[in-house]
Amino acid sequence: MSENLAKRDPRNQLAAGLFLMIWSVIGWLSVINSPALWIDEYGTDPGPGLLPIISLTILSLGALTLITVGAFQTVAQQAATEPGYWPRLLQGSLLPAFFVISLIVYISLIDVIGFIPTSTIFSLTWMLILGAKNRNETPATLLPPVAIGTSIGVGLIYFVFLYLIGVPIG
């Protein structure tokens, strides 16, 4: 009985789709980086690039189908068995979404105000947010160690890139 449940587990479809997608990405990179496959001097012959393109398209679409079906079935299964799944999912997604948005702002601000001020603000803010969340402390009690950690981290990154590697940043 447990073997049948394991075979019907939608996470297996998701894992198989991800595995096939990795192989299709490797295949597409290989095809794209092989200029001999893209030459148009074969007359009426479609050329050697046609078979890999057809095969990789089928593999990619199959992998995408497995990933999509597996993801939807996994979410549906979780939502059916756990009450309050969607509100918890939304609440759990807010902090990562805020991080991605702040990372985009951080990258765009490096050119405007420089590496050191932007990185200091970004690091200080996120260490305070995550420290307060995980340790249940107020930002005021976390500020001294976070400020020291931010100074050390940003300073080391700046030193390594500028003086050891020789790459100027911001």
Image: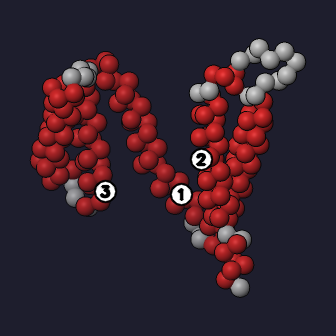
Q: Is residue 31 above or below residue 153?
A: above
Quadrant where the image shows the N terminus: bottom right
Amino acid at the residue labelled 1:
Leu
Q: Residue at x 85, y 22 (%)?
A: 45
Q: CA distance from mark 2 to mark 1?
A: 27 Å
Numbered disc in front, either 2 or 3 = 2
Q: Check disc 2 and report the residue beneath it.
A: 22
The quarter of the picture where residue 8 lies is bottom right
Q: Is residue 2 above or below residue 142?
A: below
Quadrant where the image shows the C terminus: top left
Q: Check disc 3: other Cα within 10 Å, few if <14, some if 14-19, many if 20+.
A: few
Q: x, y percentage for residue 96?
A: 44, 47
Q: Check disc 3 and report the residue beneath it.
A: 133
Q: x, y percentage for residue 115?
A: 25, 25
Q: Check disc 1 and report the residue beneath it.
A: 89
Amino acid at the residue labelled 2:
Ile
